[in-house]
Image: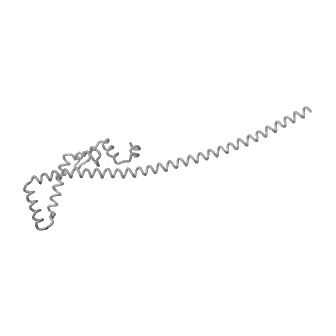
């Protein structure tokens, strides 16, 4: 009888171990399956995050390039306008000084003006007069630019640009810092932070 109890105990122990191992295998298998699901979901989430970040980065890149293009055009137009104003103002001031200093020209001009007004006619500048005026202004502009023109303000913002002769034409010279500061005046604060 001792043997039967021993065999029964061993049988029960063996069956219990097998059931325990089977249960452990089920638990391990379920855990592995759950872990694989978690890893798959995490990978999908990571891919979605990366795709969304790439989409936002592409949009930001596109918007930034568009804004930079617009700001560059604005800054160039503002500089061109300021160059025209500076050169034009200096030429007109100088030319008017010369004209008003030439008593014969001034006398003839006032006489022609008075004759036209007295006759009720409009004062018309003839083609020959227009060509002479254009030539005069072109000569004055060349003389002014040959001496170099410094632009110290554009759109109310301080700048430091110099226009002068170079290789048969005229070039705008400025330092990197001056251009950077000038360009910043046309940018939004967010772009300044990103770029500089």
Give 129 or 3, whichever is nearer the viewer: 129
Which quarter of the rendering shows the N terminus? top right
Provide residue 85's location: percent of width, then percent of height: 23, 52
Which quarter of the rendering shows the C terminus? top left
Q: Does 185 sit above or below residue 4?
A: below
Residue at 47% from the left image edge and 48% from the top image edge: 57
Q: Residue furthest top?
A: 2
Residue at 14% from the left image edge and 67% from the top image edge: 121
Provide residue 140's location: percent of width, then percent of height: 17, 52
Q: Does 1 sit above or below residue 116?
A: above
Residue at 72% from the left image edge and 42% from the top image edge: 27
Provide residue 48's location: percent of width, then percent of height: 55, 49
Give 27 or 194, whichever is nearer the viewer: 194
Provide residue 127's location: percent of width, then percent of height: 16, 63
Residue at 49% from the left image edge and 48% from the top image edge: 54
Q: Residue furthest left?
A: 104
Give 188 or 84, whichever is nearer the viewer: 188
Give 139 or 63, whichever is nearer the viewer: 63
């Amino acid at each position: 009888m001792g043997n039967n109890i021993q065999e029964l105990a061993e049988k029960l122990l063996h069956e219990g171990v097998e059931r325990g191992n089977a249960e452990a295998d089920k638990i391990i298998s379920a855990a592995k399956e759950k872990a694989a699901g978690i890893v798959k979901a995490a990978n999908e989430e990571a891919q979605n995050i990366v795709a969304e970040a790439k989409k936002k980065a592409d949009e930001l890149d596109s918007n930034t390039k568009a804004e930079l293009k617009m700001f560059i055009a604005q800054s160039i137009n503002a500089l061109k306008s300021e160059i025209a104003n500076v050169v034009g103002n200096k030429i007109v001031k100088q030319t008017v000084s010369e004209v008003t200093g030439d008593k014969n020209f001034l006398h003839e001009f006032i006489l022609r003006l008075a004759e036209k007004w007295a006759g009720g006619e409009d004062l018309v500048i003839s083609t020959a007069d227009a060509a002479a005026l254009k030539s005069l202004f072109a000569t004055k502009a060349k003389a002014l630019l040959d001496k170099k023109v410094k632009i110290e303000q554009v759109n109310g913002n301080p700048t430091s640009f110099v226009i002068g002769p170079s290789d048969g034409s005229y070039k705008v010279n400025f330092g990197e810092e001056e251009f950077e500061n000038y360009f910043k005046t046309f940018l939004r604060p967010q772009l300044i932070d990103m770029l500089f």
